Image (tube, coloured by chain):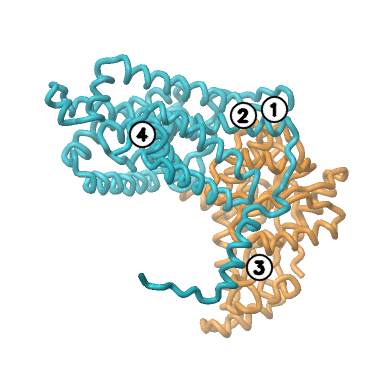
Chain colours: A orange, B cyan
């Protein structure tokens, strides 16, 4: 939201791709893998962000030749997602987009949608597919796509593989959150090294001018001026994974444009 | 009487004019086809049964011991995690794990009654503080032991029944059947068994019950065991339908409190009606209005009912 991140917040940087960043890549993949699917219904929490997200989503959907049927809002206190899923199903969508929320929310919505007989693709922005599968159950976990890390996939970068290895050694299991937490920290370190200073203003000035920056996902670049009004977003390729018949499978790397 | 000056009345009148529009914006006026209407009705029934299952144990303790047991939330949560540990980690049969979880939490109820409730019998404030302390302790312990990793029990019964455009998961149907059965068992227990009648006597007048020779501590112990066992069953079933988390009990506790207050303290049968009302509200309002507005209106309806009937639907006036 503009109060959190815009030209009015000059010391804020985003080093992980956001909900807004994933909208276009998700839509592009939907067109590629499901060319007959044109109608989307979005489910998103009523947390103050929808007035900013809906116009953006509508604009991007139109640009991709897709139709946004409805932006269905759910309360953050929701436990049973069947009612909001019924509301989404009433719009007769061909695809569902779950934007924002946690795996317990998205897994519940996926489960509810499949229980109601919806078989179309369900796309989420940036959630742990393993947690979503845990909540939704293997039977419901299919035709689901999310930009996230398949920690055991061979297509992961050496950095992600190293984080996965250390996570397993220390905690017995690894999780995409280990990478999410690492990425902004590493970006900040690079910005400090580029500035050769710990002074926040010098680090800020240096960071926003960096031509490229290393991330666990590969080489990123700074962007966001047109979208957010400030050039403080690290845009890096993101892995797209899917859950097919209960198994987390690798799809591909996608560029995440950040104008 | 002090006159209150309303500054900028135009702003406030605009706010109140805009409020209904915010709650029911034009784009929320949706048309539900008949099969989805039937789906809504079915879901209302299923959701009501979950709420009733959670509220039953809470109602028993409040009715018999006059204990507002906020720790019901963590007993519900603990039951779910114990079921998970037995079924998934130790590999026991899931139904057996559910029964063992109910027994284990029931035994925990004995500890609760003897050491947490009995020393403060009759002292509402101290008992309340004790239950709040239990929430913090148990949630923290579970959080430390389990962490924030998402866990969920597998479905107790898998499959979807589809008929006439309406879908019903077998898991929810089983939960409904168990809730209905437990409600009937509890009502029978209270009305037809000796210990149940003693519980009724204690809930009506504990001094009178003592004078009749009833051991109120024994009655309280039985009530707490039953309440905790019911909470554990609810936690295990919900842990499969939704998911497990150290903080999963908070939301359901609020629903239990709403139901018990709406039903009237001491009315077990009233829990059924109140549960149906609340389940229907929660199953239909999110469809009619956006997000958080449904929470506000839902609570508003409960408050409205209580304004006209403060003792609850089946409670007695003081």
Where is residue A245 drawn, in percent x and y?
A: 69, 33
Image marks 2 and 1: residues in contact by CB distance under 8 Å: yes
Q: Chain of mark 3?
A: A
Between the C-alphas of marks 4 and 1, the distance is: 37 Å
- The residue identified by callout 2 is B42
- The residue identified by callout 4 is B315
Between the C-alphas of marks 2 and 1, the distance is: 9 Å
Disc 2, SS: helix
Tell me the mark number nearer the camera, choosing from 3 and 4. Answer: 4
Image marks 4 and 1: residues in contact by CB distance under 8 Å: no
Tell me the mark number nearer the camera, choosing from 1 and 3. Answer: 1
Tell me the mark number nearer the camera, choosing from 2 and 4. Answer: 4
Q: Tell me if mark 2 has few (under 14), some (14-19) or many (20+) residues whose alpha carbon lies within 10 angstroms of its own.
A: some
- The residue identified by callout 3 is A214
Q: Are marks 2 and 1 on the same chain?
A: yes
Q: Are marks 1 and 3 on the same chain?
A: no
Which residue is depicted at the point 68% across and 39% down? A86
Which quarter of the picture shows residue A190?
bottom right
Q: Are marks 4 and 1 on the same chain?
A: yes
Which residue is depicted at the point 18% across and 29% down? B217
Precedes in sequence: disc 2 or disc 1:
2
Q: Chain of mark 2?
A: B
- Using the image as rendered, state which of residue A167 and residue A158 is in the foreground: A167
Between the C-alphas of marks 3 and 2, the distance is: 52 Å
Where is residue B201 drawn, in percent x and y?
A: 23, 25
């Amino acid at each position: 939201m503009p109060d959190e991140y815009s030209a009015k917040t000059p010391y804020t940087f985003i080093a992980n791709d956001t909900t807004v960043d994933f909208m276009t890549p998700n839509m592009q993949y939907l067109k590629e893998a499901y060319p007959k699917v044109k109608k989307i219904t979005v489910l998103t929490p009523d947390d103050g962000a929808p007035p900013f997200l809906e116009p953006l989503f509508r604009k991007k959907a139109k640009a991709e030749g897709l139709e946004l049927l409805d932006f269905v809002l759910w309360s953050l206190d929701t436990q049973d997602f069947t009612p909001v899923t019924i509301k989404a199903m009433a719009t007769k969508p061909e695809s569902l987009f779950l934007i924002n929320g946690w795996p317990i929310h998205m897994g519940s919505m996926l489960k509810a949608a499949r229980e109601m007989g919806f078989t179309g693709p369900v796309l989420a922005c940036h959630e742990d597919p393993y947690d979503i599968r845990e909540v939704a159950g293997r039977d419901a976990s299919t035709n689901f796509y999310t930009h996230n890390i398949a920690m055991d996939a061979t297509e992961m970068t050496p950095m992600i593989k190293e984080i996965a290895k250390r996570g397993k050694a220390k905690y017995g299991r690894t999780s995409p959150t280990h990478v999410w937490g690492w990425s902004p920290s590493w970006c900040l370190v690079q910005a400090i090294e580029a500035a050769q200073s710990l002074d926040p203003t010098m680090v800020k000035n240096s960071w926003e001018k960096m031509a490229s920056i290393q991330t666990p996902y590969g080489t990123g670049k700074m962007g966001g001026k047109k979208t957010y009004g400030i050039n403080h977003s690290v845009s890096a390729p993101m892995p797209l994974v899917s859950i097919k018949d209960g198994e987390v499978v690798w799809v591909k790397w996608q560029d995440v444009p950040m104008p | 009487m002090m006159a209150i000056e309303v500054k900028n009345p135009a702003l406030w009148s605009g706010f109140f004019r805009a409020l209904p529009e915010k709650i029911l914006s034009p784009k929320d006026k949706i048309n539900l086809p008949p099969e989805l209407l039937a789906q809504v009705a079915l879901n209302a029934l299923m959701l009501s049964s979950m709420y009733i299952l959670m509220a039953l144990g809470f109602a028993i303790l409040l009715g018999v011991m006059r204990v507002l047991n906020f720790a019901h939330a963590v007993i519900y949560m603990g039951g779910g995690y114990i079921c998970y540990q037995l079924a998934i980690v130790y590999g026991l049969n899931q139904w057996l794990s559910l029964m063992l979880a109910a027994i284990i939490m029931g035994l925990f109820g004995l500890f609760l009654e003897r050491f947490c409730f009995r020393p403060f019998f009759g002292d509402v404030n101290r008992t309340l503080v004790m239950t709040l302390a239990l929430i913090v302790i148990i949630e923290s312990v579970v959080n430390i032991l389990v962490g924030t990793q998402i866990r969920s029990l597998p479905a107790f019964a898998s499959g979807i029944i589809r008929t006439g455009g309406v879908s019903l998961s077998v898991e929810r149907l089983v939960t409904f059947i168990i809730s209905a059965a437990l409600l009937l068992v509890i009502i029978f227990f209270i009305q037809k068994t000796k210990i149940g009648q003693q519980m009724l006597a204690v809930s009506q007048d504990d001094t009178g019950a003592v004078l009749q020779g009833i051991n109120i501590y024994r009655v309280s112990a039985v009530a707490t065991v039953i309440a905790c066992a019911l909470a554990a069953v609810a936690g295990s079933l919900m842990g499969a339908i939704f998911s497990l988390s150290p903080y999963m009990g908070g939301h359901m506790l609020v629903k239990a409190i709403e139901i018990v207050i709406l039903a009237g303290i001491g009315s077990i049968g009233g829990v059924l009606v109140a549960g149906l009302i609340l389940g229907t509200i929660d199953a239909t309002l999110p469809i009619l209005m956006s997000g958080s507005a449904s929470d506000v209106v839902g609570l508003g309806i409960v408050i409205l009912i209580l304004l006209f009937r403060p003792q609850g639907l089946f409670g007695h006036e003081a």
